Image (tube, grey):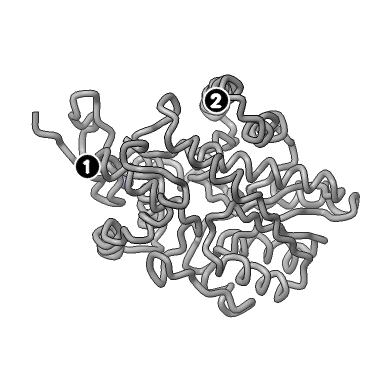
Amino acid sequence: MEKQIKKCRKCLKLLPTNEKGEVMIKGDLCPDCLRELKMNAAIDWDERKREFENIIEDIRGKHTFDGLVMLSGGKDSVYVAYLLSKIYKLNIVAITIDNGFEYDGTFENSSRLAKKLGISHMIYRLPIEVMKKYYRFFLTEESVKLKDCSQICFFCGRLLKCISIKMAKQLDVAAVFSGHTVEQVRALGDEKGKDSSYAIRQKYIQTYTERNYEKVIKILEEQNEKELIELLKDNISINRFENFIYPLQYFEYKPIEIAELLKKEVGWEADTHFTGKYISSGCKLAKIMEYVAYKNNTDTYVEREFSDQIRRGSLTVEEVQEIMNSRIEVSEERKEIMEQLSVTDDDLF
Ligand SMILES: [Zn+2]
């Protein structure tokens, strides 16, 4: 049967299909665009801001540091660091985690920006050989493989949160802050809201997460992979840390204005691994993820984030199409990364 590939008219996200590949939606807008049409008018941003300020005042001045910011150097995390240190005058410290697959510029860049903001900054480097094993496992273990390869980010994202929370506890920091956008927070299952649908969704993602961890740890126990078990074993319980705050949820997200402000205030510049304008994850593993998803005829969450960018006005449809067309061609770098991880095509598919 001919496979239908239909994209949202507004943001280019693939429209949901059933098992036969038939589009399940009437019309040509994706659920996110429809949702936004309905929701945006309903959000009282002044109230959200007051909510955020209450949280801030609750933590201020009670610990050695008020906040630890996960700083990647991208505009979102830099904006969070800026907001907390310059606007709300909190005493903060920033952490940049090296998973072994970040572009070199990430660390210089985040150090430079932390210095500009006048805040303490540390780089936490994970042991490279263990991390290679870690990613190799999640790329090649049949029972965790997903078509869009998002299992990598699913586990890694929780590990990075876990490291930041542990560090915050050691340094006596009241809360951890990250620059996740609303869409990313939703995907993590951490979005909070007034009606019960949020709680139901959260519960669903938590259950899914717990099952996945149990499954993976069991496999690793059978393989006697002690180092990997060590990395994974307490991720879920530590991720339950209450004072993990996503500030971008409390403000209407305007990425172009954020970028302009940061250029002016701290000399922030866009990373150019994809385009001069869009700043994506600085992680090289995204190249493998993209490759796997492409071969499996699906999109990655990075592409779905492009759709979010279109919806928010930071990229045009034409710009995204241009980026997507140019992405698969950059394969040399992907091959190098696969070699580093000793992963072949046969392992991936
Ligand atoms: Zn859409």
Q: Which residue is mark 1?
A: 28
Amino acid carrying label 1: it is Asp
Q: Residue at x 51, y 42 (%)?
A: 135
Which quadrant: the C terminus?
top left
Badge nearest the viewer, 2 or 1: 2
- Residue 265: x percent and y percent? 63, 77
Q: Is residue 39 left or right of residue 349?
A: right
Residue carrying label 2 = 216
Image point 56% across, 77% down: which residue? 263
Distance CA(mark 2)–CA(mark 1):
38 Å
Q: Residue at x 61, y 43 (%)?
A: 130
Q: Is residue 245 above or below residue 19?
A: below
Count of number-bearing discs: 2
Instruction: Pick the residue in front: 206 or 196.
Output: 206
Q: Which mark is residue 297?
A: none
User: In the image, what residue occupies the spot 62% across and 64% down?
Assistant: 78
Q: Is residue 324 left or right of residue 225?
A: left
Query: In the rendered image, is residue 216 in sight?
Result: yes
Please say if 241 is above or below 312. above
| Vertical placement of residue 27 versus 141, above or below | below
Q: Amino acid at mark 2?
A: Val
The residue at the far left in this view is 1
In what quadrant of the picture does the N terminus appear? top left
Of the numbered discs 2 and 1, the one sitting upstream in the chain is 1
